[in-house]
Image: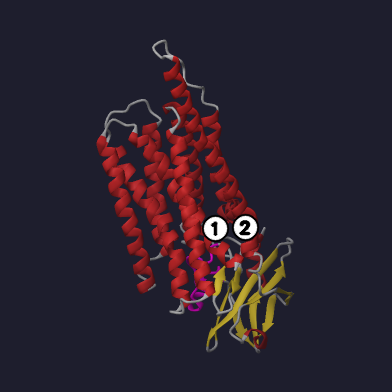
Amino acid sequence: MLQTFLQQFIPAMEEGLMLGVPLGILFVLIRRLPHEDYKKSFRSALKWGFWLSIFLVAVRVGTRNAVSRELLEGAATFVTLLAEAVILSKFLGANENFSKPLKISIAAAVMTLFLYHGFELWLIPTGSVVAALGDYFTVEFFTKILGFVSGALFAFVSSFMIYKAADALNQARLKFVFAVIFAACMIRQIIFLVQVLMARDVLSGEMWMDLMAPVINNSSLLIFVIFAAILVLPITLFSQPRPERLPSYNPAEYRKILAQAIHKRRWGAGVIISLALMTTTSSAGSYVANKQAEIVPAVPVVAEAGSVDVDLEVVKDGHLHRFVYRASTGEMVRYIVILKGGSAYGVGLDACEICGATGYYERDDNQVVCKLCDVQMNKATIGTRGGCNPIPIEYSIADGKLKVPQAELEKHAKIFQ
């Protein structure tokens, strides 16, 4: 049950933080501006982003094909990056006059952050509800919902503490923390956008794959970049000088000001405690959550006469089968085979262009699931490009065997570096 709980808690926590942290710090800055239109724009975008993300999840679940997760999140990330670039340039400048581009960028950033992280957040419990198939009065379903609620609540409380700690900073230090955290978020967003463009063949070629393969294979570690950026906030708060005692202050007034400053620093201590819990959960917790994921062992295969062959008798049971081939350069190239129905097979690498070589496993209910993002694959789409589907590879059926060209596996060896 702990594993099931963590499988819901961790993604809910991480998506909630990726949504709440930049929004909270952005709102602190907006509140200090003398123009009410910025705050109105923020609140309006917050409301529309919230409801639109829920609506799109409902449409996706209800129609399955009407909303492309990959295209929606790719487009949202692109708009978010443009908006964040404008916001950074405006806030880091000295001019605080009203700016319509800044107002539009604030609205765009808030809404598109919801269309990415909010969309991902609502998909977590929705997937549990759909997978339960109406059988909701079970310990497993209750554990999943409890994991999601706990993760989302922890993210909200942590984001609120980060907001309060940021609000305790003076303007110069707040801008510094804002720049660091937004830069960390933008790095993560750029990496995701490049992955989507690679998946859609907008970016192709060995140069991009060689560059991105190590990043994609370690993409689960990117959340720690955000944690490191958040750590800058309490460090900056604690290094902030104590309030200056003006000649007009009497001893009682100054003691009150000092007490207020000490109280504000407590939010920094709360952020450090939250960060410790986040880091532990995203490291040790993730290990526990995923340690049983690799259910099907990869069977070693070798090439003969330029072809890697597997008997159809081995793979015709409808379950997921994983094979591993040692490339000439030493990489262990894994690929999966599953009977989709009739005589149609799904054949692809044990990797995708979004999540890299993290691979897939089969749940007890005959679902093929991505180990990294817990997305369930539609069996009918395995063997076709797009989204979190396995990268398709060439194969043929002949003489009772499923044949994969040796050159095809050698070609993709760099993905498993």
- Residue 350 falls within the magenta-colored stretch: no
Which amino acid is tagged 1?
Ile
Q: Which residue is mark 1?
A: 10
Query: Going by the image, does 206 lie left or right of 91?
Result: right
Image quadrant occupied by the N terminus: bottom right
Q: Tell me which amino acid carries mark 2.
A: Gly
Q: In this orientation, does residue 193 appear? A: no
Kindly identify the residue that appears in the image at 50 percent across and 64 percent down.
Answer: 146
Mark 2 vs 1, N-terminal side:
1
Quadrant in the rendering for residue 26: top left
Place of residue 388 in the rendered image (x, y in percent of width and height, measured from the top left): 51, 66
Q: Quadrant of the C terminus?
A: bottom right
Q: Residues at badges 2 and 1 in contact (C-beta under 8 Å)?
A: yes
Q: Quadrant of residue 249?
A: top left
Q: Is residue 107 left or right of residue 367?
A: left
Instruction: State the residue in front, 311 or 356.
Output: 356
Residue 32 coordinates in the image, percent (x, y): 34, 32
Task: Return the x and y of residue 355 as percentages of the image width and height.
Answer: 55, 60
Q: Residues within 10 Å of mark 1 (few under 14, many from 20)?
A: many
Front residue (pair 195, 106):
106
> Left or right: 57 with respect to 355?
left
Residue located beneath label 2 in the image: 285
Where are the magenta residues, as a range?
Answer: 373-392
Q: Is residue 390 magenta?
A: yes
Classify 10 Å Cα crowding around label 2: few (below 14), some (14-19), many (20 and above): many
Between residues 314 and 33, which one lies in front from this camera angle? 33
In front of the other: 162 or 416: 162
Residue 200 seen in the current view: yes
Q: Residue at x 66, y 63 (%)?
A: 413
Q: Secondary structure at mark 2?
A: helix
